[in-house]
Image: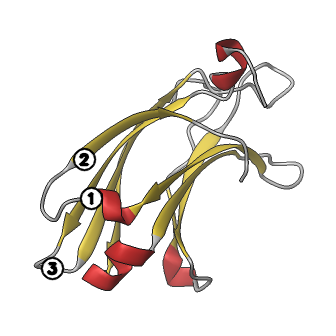
């Protein structure tokens, strides 16, 4: 579908670093900040947090999340989340799904937007910096 650039950035942008450390079999995810998130609450703000999933995979070990930042559309997390036991095979085949959600105390958590990064885009021991627009749920 064709949509104007306004709509494309309506969900906000997310800035983060990824680093695959082959020696220690770890994937380091530094969730830095988001900008211009779509307001989810009545007050025109959000209580955003980020959750990570390694796909494919359903086990709890595949899910990590940051703390929640209150009443902001430009949250700064500066949090490091680490996956252990990551192999070259995982890097070749898996996708990191990064979802920004709004913590809604009344009901379910609301999904704001997501980014999917195929891990094969990472080079071992080379930190890769991302600053990209969130997308609607795939």
In space, the residues marked 2 and 1 are separated at their CA atoms by 7 Å
Given residues 121 and 72, the one toward you in this image is 121
Sequence-earlier tag: 1 or 3: 3
Residue shown at the point (87%, 24%) measured from the top left: 42
Residue highlighted by disc 3: 24
Residue name at image x 67 percent, y 29 percent: 11
The residues bearing labels 1 and 3 have C-alpha atoms spaced at a distance of 15 Å
Q: Residues within 10 Å of mark 1 (few under 14, many from 20)?
A: some
The residue that mark 2 highlights is 128
Does 4 sit left or right of 18 as displayed? right
Residue 62: tell me if it is visible. yes
Q: Residue at x 42, y 76 (%)?
A: 93
Q: Which image quarter is the N terminus in?
A: top right
Q: Are marks 2 and 1 in contact (CB under 8 Å)?
A: yes
Residue 76 visible in rendering? no
Ranked by sequence position, the earlier of labels 2 and 1 is: 1
Q: Nearer the viewer, mark 2 or mark 3?
A: 2
- Residue 38 pos. (x, y %): 71, 26
In this figure, which residue is indicated by the disc labeled 1?
122
Image coordinates for residue 29, horizontal then vertical, percent: 34, 56
Quick one: label 2, few (<14), some, or many (20+) residues within 10 Å? some
> Element under label 2?
strand
User: Which element carries disc 3, helix, strand or loop?
Assistant: loop
Which corner quadrant of the image does residue 94 belong to?
bottom left
- Decide: is 69 above or below 87: above
Mark 2 or mark 3: whose residue is earlier in sequence: 3
Q: Nearer the viewer, mark 1 or mark 3?
A: 1
């Amino acid at each position: 579908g064709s949509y104007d650039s306004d709509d494309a950035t309506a969900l906000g942008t997310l800035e983060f670093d990824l680093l695959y450390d082959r020696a220690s079999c770890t994937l380091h995810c530094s969730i830095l900040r988001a900008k211009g998130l779509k307001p989810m609450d009545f007050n025109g703000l959000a209580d955003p947090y980020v959750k990570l999933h390694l796909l494919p995979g359903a086990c709890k070990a595949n899910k990590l999340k940051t703390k929640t930042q209150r009443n902001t559309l430009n949250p700064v997390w500066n949090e490091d989340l680490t996956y252990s036991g990551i192999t070259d095979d995982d890097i070749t085949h898996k996708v990191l799904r990064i979802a920004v959600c709004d913590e809604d105390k009344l009901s379910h958590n609301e999904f704001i937007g997501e980014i999917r990064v195929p891990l094969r885009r990472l080079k071992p021991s080379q930190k890769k910096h991302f600053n990209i627009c969130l997308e609607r749920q795939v």
